[in-house]
Image (cartoon, rainbow, N blue to C red):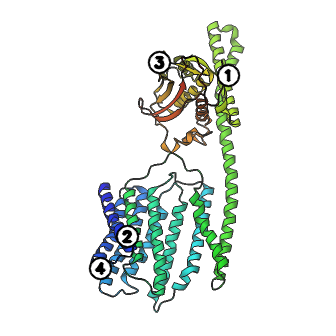
Amino acid sequence: MGTAVRIGSFVVAAVAIPFGLILAVGSSFENLTLAGVLYSFVAVGSGVVLVVAAFVAHGRARIAWTLVGAGVFAWGVGEVIWVMQASLGEIPFPGVADFFYVAGYPLIFAGVIALPYLRPGRFERIRLAIDATAGTLSLAVIMWVVYLSDVVSLGSDPLESFLNVAYPTADVLLFAALMVLAMRRSEQRLDLRIALLAGAIAVSAFGDVVFSIQTASDTYVEWGRLDATWLFSYGLFALTAWRVTRPARAQESTYRTARAWQLIAPYSAVAALFLARLLTSTGNDFLLNIATTAVAVLVVLRQNLAVREKRELLEKQRDDLVASVSHELRTPLTGIQGYAQILGESWHDLGDEDRDEMLETINTQANHLGHIVSDLIDVARDRLQNVSLTRVEYPADELVREAVAATGGEGRVRVEADSHARIWADPDRARQVLSNLITNALRYGGTEILVTAVDQGQMVALAVHDNGDGVPAKFQNDMWGRFERGLHKGNSSVSGSGIGLSVAKDLVIAHGGTIEYRTSELLGGACFEFTIPVPDQSGTALVGSGAALSG
């Protein structure tokens, strides 16, 4: 079905766009019968492919795209009736075509409202609603002041009066749908489905405004540039159907703050309203005063809400950080306290080997605790990439074994390291990087973990593979940031402070190496790989970026 929809979508767009260009450049179209057939095909076809494309989607998305497609199809039926009436030389008003036209607007608006989106938090939901309301109200009032008040009139009968009011109301629905699409919260940088749909609605709304002005001034010309506008709109609807069959995937960056257009869209309309208030002095003063006051109140409410939202967000981030760091510090501290207590109470009852093992564990956990505290201090001071490194030539396989032992991964972690591979690095800091990656694999990876060290000539590549689920695409960019915990953000029951990858990246850069994430080609889960320079065989020390070296 998807392939058939895509072919149909391209066929409709391939007819609509060239036909629209012919009309847009002012070329005459002598064969009016052919023009009517092509126009009807484009209008009805765009609605049909959208409705059919909706069945490729699932759940709420299917309902939403079906509603949008049904609305466009209703317009298409209206266009067919209009073309038939035009060929007979008489277009009645009100006519059957008008009711199909009017019916399409609420269907499209309902479909836009029903489109699934990334659920915002409580404050953001209210803020987005205020933004959309302010923008829609401003646009509606501007439309009324600029042209609707002149073109709307009561007809000679109730049906005509109804249509005279229904059309401008329908235009307001289109602008409201555009505002909703602009305010739509998405984890994707650019959802092409939404962009094409917004473009189609915007072009159609523009055509409606021009049509209202032209019919009021009796300057509308059939098969002219205005009809090209609607053809372009139907072409964009057809391309939207094509994109619906290929759902956009989450991009590498998660949605965090309002995008630029989400601030510009509603408040450019607000600015236009205030400008209209300044330039208009007769006929609409009362309406402008009421609308301007209402929008000003919404703006004040929005700013107060933003301040409160930011304060609560900072408090939540602080609480999450305290909970995460406390959990992270508690693990080594508990080990130190437990073994220290056993040694204090049973020193003489323990053999030398047991005492040495416990002391070694206390020393390892104390070093681990010290590194966590050091990481927190370094992160707070923003100086990890410029940390002082004491570089020595060090065996890569020994570094791997030490890192595995420091994380308690013996038995779970398999090691494959080149025995001849040697690195030029600060062993403590390189071990810290590898330990952070192994710790993450032990926490979040699957049942199998593999650490490799491969000599690549000028660099040694150290990688940690697992057979877990990997990192979701939407977190793969932000996971290198400080206190980022992906799916576990805000969940203090899952260990981790969210600084491990940030620290690892900065330390690798300080060594002059690189670090990256990819899907493991060996185990199928996550793979974090970083490189460390090898010793210069000529005897010249290799200097890493921003590192002060000794040794």
Image quarter in which the N terminus is found: bottom left
From the top left corner, tell me how far across and down residue 528 is, in percent: 50, 32
Answer few, some or many: residues within 10 Å of disc 1's Cα (few below 14, many 20 plus, some between 14 and 19): some
Which element type, helix, strand or loop, lies under badge 2?
helix
**Residue located at (47% from left, 36% from top):** 470
Which element type, helix, strand or loop, lies under badge 4?
loop
Which element type, helix, strand or loop, lies under badge 3?
loop
Q: Is residue 469 above or below residue 285?
A: above
Nearer mark to the viewer, of 3 and 4:
4
Name which residue type carries label 2: Leu
Give the residue at mark 3.
Answer: 418
- The label number, if any, that marks residue 366 in the structure image: 1
From the top left corner, tell me how far across and down residue 157 is, in percent: 45, 91
Give the residue at mark 2.
Answer: 21
Side of 299 where 404 appears, left or right: left
Name which residue type carries label 3: Asp
Alpha carbon distance from label 1 to label 3: 30 Å
Name which residue type carries label 1: Ala
Tell me where residue 231 sits by quadrant.
bottom left
Nearer mark to the viewer, of 3 and 2:
2
